Amino acid sequence: MIFSDMKIFTTIPEINDYIVRCKQDGISIGFVPTMGALHSGHISLIERAKRENSLVGCSIFVNPIQFNKKEDLEKYPRTFDEDVIKLTDVGCDFLFNPSVDEMYPGTVTEKYDFGFLDTVMEGEHRPGHFNGVAVIVRKLFEIFRPEKAYFGMKDYQQLCVIQTMTAMLGLPVEIIPCPTVRESDGLAMSSRNVRLSPEARKIAPEIYHILSEAQNRRHSMSVFELENWAIQEFGKFQEFDVEYFKITDSKTLRPFSDWSEVKSAIACTAVFLGGVRLIDNLIIF
């Protein structure tokens, strides 16, 4: 199927045939996996992939096995027609939009052991989430056979898991981390933002403001003090319900007690705002 100049595939055999022909012609492929509800953050990934590859492919697939709660899966925004227009406008070459049955014709039995990475922060609060992510990303890598795949740093822990999986399995794809894209007021762009009420949307930028101030305060506070300070700052707004605020080694995501113990640190947080779960992070140094 073709929409304007972008090819759209819905089955694995169709896209496999296309990619085999591309590979035979020596064409390099950049890949951007998504779950749709595209925003400027996704588009920035497509734009970078276009600069660095002969062809750019995107997937839109709301992956059911990475959701812990059925209601979250049901509420996930689906805006396929609008997404196709955005991808066409940015010059995406081809799109894969499979059904759940196409991707999972049988019971999923794959299990990955990411060790410590899967036990903290998102892993602690969303058990099984990263296994679901790993299963679908590996499947998509095998289908697209990209030279490079592009992931936003807003989902920093997910990025670390995908980098680990790729290395563990020896997959021939380079993982390209891309900076978080933010609204003018600092809110990290997310498909979930459309679910925020007007009142919640006004408060949401405080997430980034608190992260930025934490970055500024690291010279005058210990790690423990800074984590507690951030949680207290969120507590000034009754609308926020903090799930976690953690400062970790940016490479391993392991906690530490003294700034001198690590070469680079990152602050990661997850909060509920009006019933919508938002995550963000910022490199401290």
Image (cartoon, grey):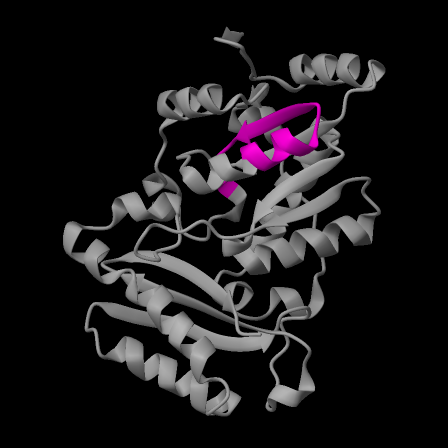
Residue sitting at the far left:
199
Depth check: give the residue in front, 49 or 278: 49
Q: Disc count in the image? A: 0
Quadrant of the image occupied by residue 113: bottom right
In x, y percent, where is residue 145?
75, 30
Query: Horizontal placement of 249 versus 27: left or right?
Result: left
Q: Is residue 81 left or right of residue 88?
A: left
The N terminus - image quarter: top right
Q: Is residue 17 above or below residue 187?
A: above
Q: Position of residue 285 (x, y in %)?
A: 58, 74
Residue at 64%, 76% in the rendered image? 254
User: Quick check: can you spot residue 2?
Assistant: yes
Indicate the position of residue 243 as horizontal and vertical percent values: 39, 71
Which one is nearer the viewer's eye here, 279 or 265? 265
Q: Residue at point 29% right, 70% down?
A: 241
Which portion, as a residue range, is magenta?
Answer: 46-64
Between 174 and 99, which is closer to the camera in this rendering?
A: 174
Seen from the viewer's position, the closer of residues 55 and 15 is 55
- Residue 240 spot, x, y in % from top left: 26, 69
